[in-house]
Amino acid sequence: MEDESRVRRKRKKRKKKSLWKKILIAFLVVLLIIVGAGAFVAWRVYSDVQSSTNEMYEEAGHDQIRNKPVVVDDGKDPFSVLLMGIDTGDMGRTDQGRSDTMMLMTVNPNTEKTTIVSIPRDTYTEIVGNGTMDKINHAYAFGGTAMALNTVQNLFDIPVDYFVSVNMEGLQQIIDAVGGIDVTPELTFNQGAYSFVEGQTVHMDGNTALEYSRMRKKDPNGDYGRQERQRSIVEATVRKIASVESVLNYQGVLNSLSANMQTNMSFDDMVDAFTKYNSAVSNISQEQLSGTGEKQDGVYYEFIPEEEVQRVSNILKEELELN
């Protein structure tokens, strides 16, 4: 009897070991499947992002005025980006268009600061490569991205390393792709079919955001007020693109970006900028290039005093560590 009981106990132990062994094997198999699926998904996302950024890539073609090229892969070099909103696609336009919105951004990982300077579209300045004095937003119309970059470089006497251009219709599609943005108006006004109330946060789709950023004549600050609203739209859109909701809908976001955005930032540059300049991008300072609006020969221009141009130039040079 004792022998039989001993045998039964051994069989129970073997069954328990066998059960736990099966459970462990099953767990490992499930874990491997999850890891494999995750790796596949990660690879697919990486591949899709790389493909989309390759579609967006466009050579700048402007004059390089740095002593040495900026290097972003070590996360130490400050760099500059010209952001342009092109009015092609807005109000049914199909021509070359003008840079209706121009913002110059510097990103410095050492000061952990990003500075965004809004440039009035009517700024009277030399159009480099065209041999004329004209509105700065005409540079893009006359000579595309290269002429716009060269003109901005000449105005502030600094190098512009990268550019990002988005057509106005494309901005609308991008905002729709991220599920809309939340913006709190600082002014009460009506524009098109929409009403905006100061202090009341509005969830905006692409068309609402476009109307909100377009208004100028009803703003007591004129084009400066419009530029401030444009900055708020850009900031809200960037924040939404980085949100969990947009990451889950990454394919739709990528499709809208690749169809409407051009940049000379390579895929590797973008990865480095997002991963190694986080602290700088999260700390944003805004500057406004300001002047006086007047008519000359029947045409409206924004005349910027030399001391104002120099003030902004000094800020940009300091952030780019050129002083």
Image (cartoon, rainbow, N blue to C red):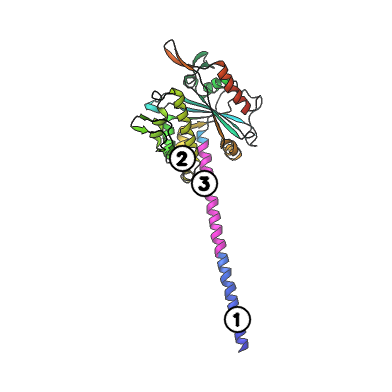
Q: Residue furthest front?
A: 199
Q: CA distance from mark 2 to mark 3?
A: 15 Å
Q: Which mark is residue 253?
A: 2
The residue positioned farthest toward the bottom in the image shown: 1
Tell me which amino acid carries mark 3: Arg
Question: Does dot 3 land on a helix, a strand or a loop?
Answer: helix
Quadrant that contains the C terminus: top right
Q: Position of residue 101 (x, y in %)?
A: 47, 26
Circle 1 is placed at which residue position? Answer: 9
- Disc 1 marks a residue whose amino acid type is Arg
What is the distance, in whole Å, between disc 1 and disc 2 at their CAs? 62 Å
Q: Is residue 52 visible?
A: yes
- The secondary structure that dominates the magenta segment is helix
Query: In this image, 86 relative to 266: left or right?
Result: left
The percent position of residue 294, horizontal first and vertical second, equals 45, 14
Residue that lies at the very extreme toward the left in this rendered image: 193
- Give the amino acid at mark 2: Val
Disc 3: which residue? 44
Quarter location, residue 159? top right
Which residue lies at the image location 44% right of the left edge and 23% below the top edge?
Answer: 223
